[in-house]
Image (cartoon, grey):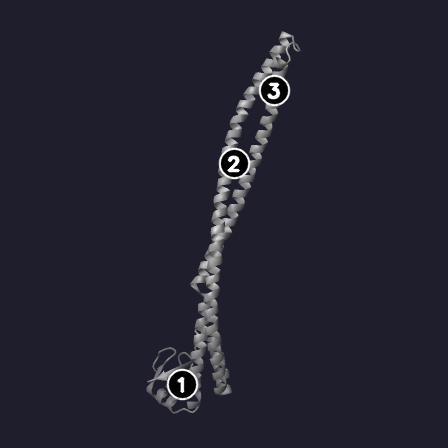
Amino acid sequence: MSELGPLLELQHYDSEADRLRARIDDLPEAATVRDLETELRRGRAALAQAAEKATEARREQDRLETQLGMLESKAASVADRLYGRAGVVSSPKELQALQADLDMINRQKSDLEEEVLAAMESREEAVGLEKRTEEAVGDLERRLAQASDALEVTRKDIEVTLREVEIKREAVRPSVPADVLSLYDRIRAQQSDGVAAAPLNGGVCGGCQLRLPAAEYEAARHSSGVVRCEACRRILVVA
């Protein structure tokens, strides 16, 4: 069984490599980046809505101010006919009609001025919301950039260690007999934890922690071939 001694060393490096890969896949920094990416997508969607509302508020204020300007021009024109050019309109009936028109225009103008004021408030509120949302999105972008940088640094550090472990792993593989190595690789692929070889210490399987019957343990200690645990089917290496 001495020729299988390097198998446990190989298993150690494979398990360490598995642990490092799992750590890369489950870094807290990665979870932070994912959360910030989700928050940023929502923030950008909210910003698009806020920008659309601000644009609508601007258009509505512009529309009302245009209407108000037209009414003011119309009121000035009617007032000019009434007061600006004395004697042009002399008919009492026509003067009365012009006065009625001016009164109606002024009422419309007064109502429209209130609408303009309300539109200005709505625009100010919408633009303020857009600005606050834009600032929040900008803050999220900065935080995401920082978190991504931190993730990259941590990932690179782990990848350096992983490469070192893989180099050691590849150095050990040739020292394991080819048929045993092939069996080892197949068992590793079948085991959820990737453990294909385990020490047999004092009759206890280092993989599933079950104790072998005394007769099997004695047979394993003196066997010149590959011994496998009857329970978990891992290769056993007598410690």
How packed mark 2 is, by other alpha carbons closer than 10 Å (few <14, some 14-19, many 20 or more), is many
Q: Is residue 102 visible?
A: yes
Q: Please tell me which of labels 2 and 1 falls first in the chain.
A: 2
143 vs 205: above or below: above
- How far across and how far down the image is residue 146, in percent? 47, 58
Neighbourhood count class around disc 3 (C-alpha, 10 Å): few under 14, some 14–19, many 20 upward: some
Name the residue carrying label 2: 123
Image point (54%, 20%), residue name: 107
Residue that numbered label 3 is attached to: 76
Q: Report the amino acid beneath label 2.
A: Arg
Q: What is the three-letter code of the residue carrying label 3?
A: Ala
Q: Earlier in the sequence, mark 3 or mark 2?
A: 3
Discs 3, 1 touching: Cβ within 8 Å: no
Q: Residues within 10 Å of mark 1 (few under 14, many from 20)?
A: many
Q: Nearer the viewer, mark 3 or mark 2?
A: 3
> Which residue carries the number 1 mark?
237
Left or right of 231: which side holds 97?
A: right
Q: Secondary structure at mark 3?
A: helix
Q: Position of residue 102 (x, y in %)?
A: 59, 17
